[in-house]
């Protein structure tokens, strides 16, 4: 089954189902989809989203910026929106370390976000954990950066290996090439400058400890972690 989804108006929608977990299971199809901003969906795109079983859109936002918002008249009945602010451009440390350095749109900054804002990371995971029955879309501007952070956390919680999490992230490079033809070269320059790789950046972000413990430090409860596992992992 192809994880990439054809949702007219979005370039970077894909199902997080079918990925292996460390205990021999796989992630559940239709439970969570990662995507660029659904505000850009055409009517046919909204119909495809609804037909895929999506009933919640978790819109990841950055304080100090304005993302395009959907025309509520175009949103199918029964699809709810929740906005979670995972970044803050009013934080001078974040601006210096991530924005001014050019690392903001790469996985190199994921570790800084998890270390600096465990509460924001936990809030994003919580939004998926507590979403009503049905599939959930996690989304941001292009579906790679803020969405990549949350996808990394969700997949790590259910035991998807780092190599598969990194491979999932890199799919966005190809899917977004029509919109950002120069991004791959820019990314490689940053990776070379920082002497790292996509895999190593994600491995460093997750660290050697249990990511669930780090999310608990941000306020996520054991019940919410169990809800993520129940939602995203096949029995």
Image (spheres, rainbow, N blue to C red):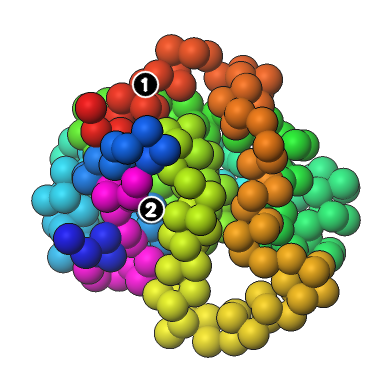
Locate residue 117, reporting x and y percent.
71, 34
The answer to which image quadrant residue 155 occupies is top left
| Main SS category, magenta section | loop
Can residue 41 be seen here?
Answer: no
Q: Residue at x 87, y 56 (%)?
A: 96
Instruction: Please state which of residues 186 and 43 is positioned toward the viewer in this rendering.
Output: 186
Instruction: Please state which of residues 233 and 96 is positioned toward the viewer in this rendering.
Output: 233
Label 1 sits on residue: 227
CB-based contact (under 8 Å), mark 1 and mark 2 = no
Locate residue 128, reporting x and y percent.
40, 32
Q: Which mark is residue 175?
A: none
Instruction: Please state which of residues 37 and 118 is positioned toward the viewer in this rendering.
Output: 118
Q: Is residue 192 above or below residue 140?
A: below
Q: Secondary structure at mark 1?
A: helix
> Is 202 placed left or right of 223 in the picture?
right
Q: Residue at x 22, y 45 (%)?
A: 29
Crowding at dot 2, Cα within 10 Å, few <14 / some 14-19 / many 20+, comes out as many
Q: Which region of the structure is painted magenta?
A: 6-20
> Is 84 placed left or right of 51 in the picture?
right
Of badges 1 and 2, the one in the foreground is 1
The count of marks equals 2
The answer to which image quadrant residue 171 occupies is bottom left
Instruction: Please state which of residues 205 and 133 is positioned toward the viewer in this rendering.
Output: 205
Q: Residue at x 64, y 85 (%)?
A: 185
Label 2 sits on residue: 34
The first of marks 1 and 2 along the sequence is 2
Can residue 92 be seen here?
Answer: yes
Q: Residue at x 44, y 43 (%)?
A: 160
Q: CA distance from mark 1 to mark 2?
A: 18 Å
Locate residue 224, reporting x and y percent.
44, 18
């Amino acid at each position: 089954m192809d994880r990439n989804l054809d949702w007219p108006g979005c370039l970077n929608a894909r199902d997080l189902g079918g990925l292996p977990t460390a205990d021999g299971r796989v992630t559940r199809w239709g439970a969570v989809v990662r995507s660029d901003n659904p505000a850009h969906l055409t009517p046919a795109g909204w119909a495809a989203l609804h037909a895929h079983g999506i009933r919640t859109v978790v819109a990841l936002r950055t304080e100090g910026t304005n993302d395009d918002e959907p025309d509520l008249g175009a949103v199918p009945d029964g699809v709810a929106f929740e906005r979670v602010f995972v970044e803050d451009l009013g934080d001078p440390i974040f601006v210096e370390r991530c924005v001014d350095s050019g690392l903001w749109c790469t996985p190199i900054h994921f570790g800084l976000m998890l270390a600096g804002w465990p509460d924001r990371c936990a809030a994003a995971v919580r939004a998926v954990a507590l979403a009503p029955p049905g599939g959930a879309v996690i989304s941001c501007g292009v579906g790679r950066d803020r969405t990549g952070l949350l996808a990394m956390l969700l997949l790590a919680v259910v035991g998807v290996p780092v190599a598969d999490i990194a491979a999932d992230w890199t799919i966005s490079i190809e899917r977004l090439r029509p919109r950002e033809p120069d991004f791959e070269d820019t990314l490689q320059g940053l990776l070379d400058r920082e002497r790292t790789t996509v895999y190593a950046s994600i491995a460093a972000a997750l660290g050697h400890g249990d990511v669930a413990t780090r999310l608990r430090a941000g306020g996520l409860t054991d019940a919410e972690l169990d809800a993520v596992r129940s939602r995203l992992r096949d029995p």
